[in-house]
Every structure is written in structure tokens, then in C-alpha cells.
Amino acid sequence: MGTHLITGAGSGIGAAVARRLADRGEDLWLLARNAVRAKELAAQFPGARTLVGDLANPEKLSWAFGQQPLPDRIDSLVHSAGVIELGAIADLPAKAWQRQLAANLVAPAELTRLLLPLVRAAQGQVVFVNSGAGLSARAQWGAYAATKHGLKALADSLRAEEHDNGVRVTSVYPGRTATPMQESTHQQEGKEYDPGRWIDPESVATAILTAIDLPRDAEINDVSVRPGR
């Protein structure tokens, strides 16, 4: 049985990964943005433990973790939380960039930095749930894609730096997936949302668990998951 810390476990891909790990008796630690959300996650995943830390304010994570117990080791750290604000480069204000950079890039970097000793202790794995936008950028997607391109760079550098410590690093690039975030994206695009057209979060969870469960003689660095319909 391993110990796994997951962000974004309340819905979508993060929730699917958390459910699968819970069903097989793994030890779960779930990050919540505040105490109210922590209680909701504890009710959603009985037996899981929670940590409170707001990814919108990554500079405060170190202080927050200093006030709470942490696991002794982390076999996988799964970064699944994120935010998206679409808009043309000509229109997006600095605050929209800052919100996305904080939650999608700076927070995963800081969270990884703070928890890396625990991942090293387990010779564990860091999984970044990226996006197809982390590989290519389209009109209106510039700010979000920039954060996800940065997340790819973070993962690639971390992999090179931590290889000799036995830490594996995987980036997962899902295409459009049937999640609340995707519904919000469709609203921003002014499009009708049909979840049946897109990837089931369980399918992305399968890719993530495949990377985590891979025998130690190998490592999945990057995996793209695309809609099959």
C-alpha cells in the first residue's frame, strides 16, 4: 500500500484517481484550499486525510504546511488542480495571467519543492496532469497554454534533476475531458457542452495509474490521451 497526495481531488480527473486509489486500499492525502473544502473531501473520501493550502496563493503554502502534520513519505504526488481563463492576448489583463500562473505553474512548483524530500524518501513519483494546450497553443488559449507549456518545462527539468534520487516524473496531456472545468471552458467559448463527446475522466485516471504502477525498471515520461470518438 502506498501513500498518495493529490490536488484537485474534488472533481474530474483528480477525483477519478482518488477513487481508484481508495478502492484498492491506498493511503490518501488530499489538498484542500480551505477548512470547509477539507471537510467536504473527507466526507467524499472516507479514511482519506486532508491538507489545507490554497494553490491560488503559492507563497503561503510553506507556512500552511508548517502548521499541519505531513505524511512520512509520498509514493506519488499527483498535480491535478488547475484553472482556465480564455481570452485574446489583446484582451486578457495581468490579473488573469497571474491567477493562471499561480494555480497552474507556481503552485505545482512550490508544492513539489516542499514535498520533494518525502517523495525522495519513497523513491516515488511526481505526476503532472498537463493538457493538450501544454503541447500547442491556439487563439484565445494563450495564457492557459503558456502556463501548461511552463508546466512541461518544470516536469522535464525535475525529471533530469531527480533521476539519480530514484524519483520518476510523468506528464499527462489529456485532450478535452468531461469534467466541470471542461463545462466552464465551453461556457467561455460560447459552445454547447456535451460530455458524451469527450474523454471520460476514468480513462485519464487509467493512464495515470499505469504510469504510477509501472515496474521500477521503467518510467513513462510523457503520455497524451486523446478523445476516441
Image (cartoon, rainbow, N blue to C red):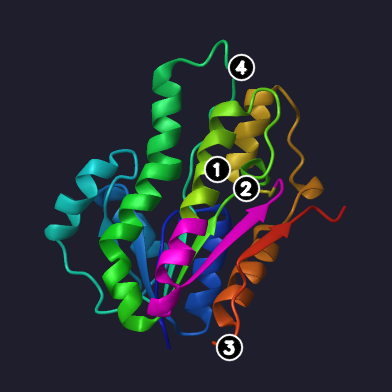
Residue at horizontal 58%, vertical 17%?
89
Gap in angstroms between the C-alphas marked 2 and 1: 7 Å
Asked if the residue under mark 4 is in contact with the one under mark 3, i.e. CB atoms within 8 Å, the reply is no
Q: Is residue 43 left or right of residue 17?
A: left
Q: Amino acid at mark 2?
A: Ser
| Residue at (46% x, 52% y) in the render | 154
Residue 164 image point, x, y percent? 41, 77
Is 123 on the left or on the right of 219, as rendered? left
Q: Residues within 10 Å of mark 4 (few under 14, many from 20)?
A: few
Q: Residues within 10 Å of mark 3 (few under 14, many from 20)?
A: few
Magenta stretch bounds = 156-176
Q: Which SS class for mark 1? A: helix
Q: Is residue 196 above or below residue 184?
A: below
Give the distance between the C-alpha atoms of the residues marked 1 and 3, in whole angstroms. 28 Å
Mark number displayed over residue 217: 3
The kind of secondary structure element at disc 3 is loop
Residue at numbered disc 1: 148
Q: Are discs 2 and 1 less than 8 Å apart at CB?
A: yes
Task: Out of 30 and 78, give the one closest to the viewer.
Answer: 78
Judge depth for marks 3 and 4 and give the one in front.
3
Q: Which residue is mark 2?
A: 131
Displayed quadrant of residue 223: bottom right
Which of pointers 2 and 3 indicates the residue nearer the eye? 3
- Residue 138 part of the magenta-drawn span: no
Mark earlier in primary sequence (4, 2): 4
**CA neighbours of label 1 inside 10 A, class few (<14), some (14 to 19), many (20+):** many
